[in-house]
Amino acid sequence: MSELWELTAHEAQDGLRAKEFSSVELTESVLTRVDAVEDRVNAYITRTDEVAREQAREADARFAAGTATPLTGIPFAVKDLIVTKGVRTTAGSRMLGDFVPPYDSHVYEQLKRAGAVMVGKANMDEFAMGSSTEHSAYGVTRNPWDTDRVPGGSSGGSAAAVAAGECIAALGSDTGGSIRQPAALCGVVGLDPTYGRVSRFGIIAFGSSLDQVGPIGRDVEDVATILDGIGSHDPRDSTSDPAPRPDMRHYLGRDVAGKKIGVPREYFIDGMDDGVRTRIDEALRHLESLGCEVDTDLSLPMTEHALAVYYLIAPSEASSNLARYDGVKYGLSERGGSMWENMEQTREQGFGDEVKRRIMLGVYALSAGYYDQFYLKAQKVRTLITNEFREAFTRYDVLVTPTTPGVAFPVGDKLDDPYAMYLNDIYTLPSAVAGLPALSLPCGLSEGLPVGLQIIGDVGAEGTILQIGHAFEGALDEANRLAPL
Ligand code: GLN
């Protein structure tokens, strides 16, 4: 071990508890790393060095007082749609370029309560709409494995920061793949929890029936620990599940022999990279060697409709959620004309092209005359997709698929072709539409770039997913990989 910023969160915890180093020293190591690489990566929209130093001092006081938790003193990147009191929160948009929230999101409250350290607000596609972090008003984030390539998105800043050593762990958000896809492309671990598992209070909304905050880390244990730390029930989010939450770390290290794994053939499309296919085939053999029963004779025919369903429901909800940016209460405000002119100017100036495209899609799908044909139909097909998964989980503990059809693509490659960009999410959209938990973890490289393995579970089955992910990771010995930046 050469530098403190290279540690996983649990390794850092061990060192902090053993007083081998302080949180202040750990944090300074991370901040020095940010200084060294941030101009090549651009993982952060806003750096919060002074907040981090203050929180690190508080963390050290907690270690001294014996009140530390597993996240105390750990430097985090926080996706910039997670509202942080007193710290600018932009959602990657010009619209919120000067927005300093007067309150904290539930998840940031939990991080603070746990004594974690915030290094900065991570870059993202504007309002989380995108798969490459190129749709940010604050510049593209670069993939630390190859800075000519995208880190994925929309939580590209969070995933890149973890992979580049610009934090130890991060929070992202996933609507249709935005935690898992960038985690896969950056070679780190990301978990999209069951819908309702993590509070959306203080999360700038995109698609409210889909949005979930979740952890991105260097190994499965870190991701499990973070979910325990941020996942408490919250009455301020009416969709927050009040059921008791089992301790996720309890599942780690348990035997996975006899676990039934379904591999749906619809996730192995013609257009997928050969290198990805090879790594996934190897991963399946690894799972078999751990004693799992892998069944590749599974068909989920509704899978192919998830893309259409998602791109009707998510934009519909977005068009409603983004109606609040009218230049009146907060955010950008163009003045000088009539009320209608001001609103039009505010939205014209404040939103980027992709956001405008989504709003137009959504408004169209919801409009009188088209509502039944598009939005209502999409909701019905959503139920069919959910039922198909539900039926599969009567026979399998988890489903295993690739996270993405290809590795990280070059910056600019898909920018002129929204449909090609949307296709990057074909493997992450179905579980999102059904509200299911899904993990992406590294399963090797193709052409020198990371490949992600996706493990999808039934509602509330995060424990099983993490158990299998943890066993798999141990078998491959690929924990704690950092990009060779
Ligand atoms: N890439 C998908 C989109 O553009 C998903 C984004 C997300 O999960 N926030 O909508």
Image: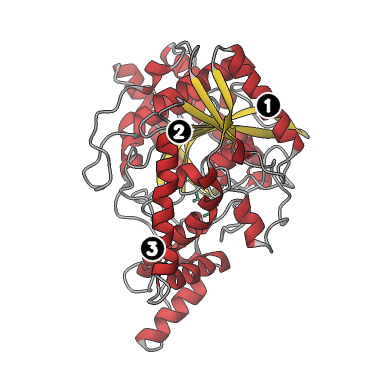
Earlier sequence position, callout 1 versus callout 2: 1
Q: Is mark 3 within 8 Å of ligand 1?
A: no
Q: Quadrant of residue 224?
A: top left
Q: Which residue is mark 3?
A: 376
Look at the picture and state if 197 lies above or below 314: above
Q: Secondary structure at mark 3?
A: helix
Give the residue at x 38% y 85%: 340
Q: Secondary structure at mark 2?
A: helix
> Mark 1: few, some, or many residues within 10 Å (few <14, many ≥20)?
some
- Give the number of the mark in front: 3 or 1: 3
Earlier sequence position, callout 2 versus callout 3: 3
Look at the picture and state if 350 lies above or below 471: below
Look at the picture and state if 350 lies above or below 8: below
The amino acid at mark 3 is Leu
> Mark 3: few, some, or many residues within 10 Å (few <14, many ≥20)?
some
Q: Nearer the viewer, residue 136 or 366?
A: 366
Q: Which residue is mark 1?
A: 281
Give the residue at x 51% y 70%: 356
Give the residue at x 35% y 85%: 339
Which x, y percent locates residue 35?
61, 40
Q: Which residue is mark 2?
A: 392
Q: Quadrant of residue 335?
A: bottom left
> Mark 2: few, some, or many residues within 10 Å (few <14, many ≥20)?
some
